[in-house]
Amino acid sequence: MAHILASIPIFLILSVFQSVAVSRITFLSGSADIVLLAIVSWITVEDEGNYIVWAIIGGFFISILSAMPLAVTVLVYLAAALLTKLVHRLLWQSPILTIFLSTTLATVLKFFIEFIALKFMDIPSPFLISLGSILMPSLLLNIFLIFPVYIMMADIGNLISPKEDKYAG
């Protein structure tokens, strides 16, 4: 329960930071997604089953601040969370490989879900131009930022529920 209650202020701060600062750091037309990276990192750090709640809360806060519909943003973060959990189960011995592979797959998945949503909303977006000027730069920025976000989420996880040191005295 403490994890779920802690997720609300964490994602509130991250979503505001995403909309105020991170979205202004662009490469071509792509930008990083700190909330997506936090969800990927949290699933890799914690073995609790509350990652779906974290994805819903993160999607809700981002949908408030973006032009995408609520269902699309929640679907993006839920799909990314489920994909990350699958990758984490397959690569459970290598968290670094898990976060980099999950970040790559989640960013690509987010791009395609949002691209399809834009098509349904009749907003023109040429696929190849979007691929080169949005997906690839966003992927590069997300991969660049995943390790600091992973460390931050590991520290938050230790604050919320400290783990006993197995090797201590």
Image (cartoon, grey):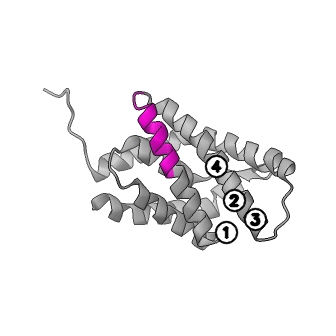
Whole-Å distance between the Cαs marked 3 and 1?
A: 8 Å
For label 3, the SS is helix
Q: Going from the N terminus, do you reach mark 4 or mark 3 first? A: 4
Give how far across and how far down residue 107 sits, in percent. 64, 47
Which residue range is magenta in the image?
A: 81-93
Q: Which mark is residue 109?
A: 4
Q: Residues within 10 Å of mark 1 (few under 14, many from 20)?
A: some
What is the spatial separation of the Cα atoms under label 4 and label 2, in whole angstroms? Answer: 9 Å
Q: Which residue is mark 3?
A: 118
Image coordinates of residue 2 in percent, x first then y, are: 28, 60
Residue under numbered circle 2 = 114
Q: Is residue 107 left or right of residue 79?
A: right
Residue appearing at x 33%, y 65% in the figure: 5
Which disc number belongs to residue 68? 1
**How far, Cα to Cα, is label 4 from label 3?**
14 Å
Q: Amino acid at mark 3?
A: Leu
Indicate yes or no whether the magenta region holds residue 33. Answer: no
Majority secondary structure in the magenta region: helix
Quarter of the image containing the N terminus?
Answer: bottom left
